[in-house]
Image (cartoon, helix red, strand yellow):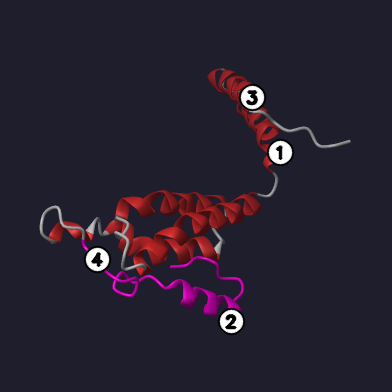
Amino acid sequence: MPQSKTTTADAAEALGRAQGHLSTEDYTGAVSALSAALAPLGDLSALAAAAVEKAEAMVTPLVAALEDETKENPSAKDFMPAYEILKMALRLDPENAEAAEGMSDMAHLVEGGDESSSEEEGAPRKRKADDAGVESSKEVRRRKEVEPNHSLPL
């Protein structure tokens, strides 16, 4: 028999039960209610790995735009959603080296802000991927052949 899936309604109901337990200082009951709701998630490291893959899928077209001289370069804001997903992956699995490496690789892009503000107002700033500290897709493919466990293109 297939494992039943916890729906959003099930999770909301479990949260309500847990809050009820917490209001009466029944911490054991709260833990039990929330454990049941979280159980279908299973191994959080698998969710973290999926999050890293999603971040890679989000970043790859941005890196391609950095490499393409005919396209406007993405801004720091464009990289933020993938960066936030990597942060979530690291929270789910603090030992996830790919998430940590991806965050480290992207830090200068998202924490430094949009570099185009130093250029003439309204003129898009063009830079190559190398100038932004981002690996080209060719470099990524070459490194994947040598290091198959590394997947982020930054």
Give the residue at mark 2. 146
First in sequence: mark 4 vs mark 2: 4
First in sequence: mark 1 vs mark 4: 1
For the residues labelled 3 and 2, the Cα–Cα distance comes to 46 Å
Residue 5, percent across and down?
A: 73, 33
| In this view, the mark in front (3 or 2) | 2
First in sequence: mark 3 vs mark 4: 3
Instruction: Name the kind of residue labelled 3 in the image.
Output: Ala
For the residues labelled 2 and 1, the Cα–Cα distance comes to 36 Å
Q: Which element type, helix, strand or loop, lies under badge 4?
A: loop
Residue 114, percent across and down?
A: 24, 56
Q: Which mark is residue 16?
A: none
Residue 91, percent across and down?
A: 51, 51
Decide which of 33, 53 is in the foreground and name it: 53
Q: Which element type, helix, strand or loop, lies under badge 2?
A: helix
Q: In the figure, residue 120 lies in which quadrant?
A: bottom left
Residue range (magenta): 125-154
For the residues labelled 4 and 2, the Cα–Cα distance comes to 31 Å
Instruction: Name the kind of residue labelled 4 in the image.
Output: Lys
For the residues labelled 1 and 4, the Cα–Cα distance comes to 46 Å
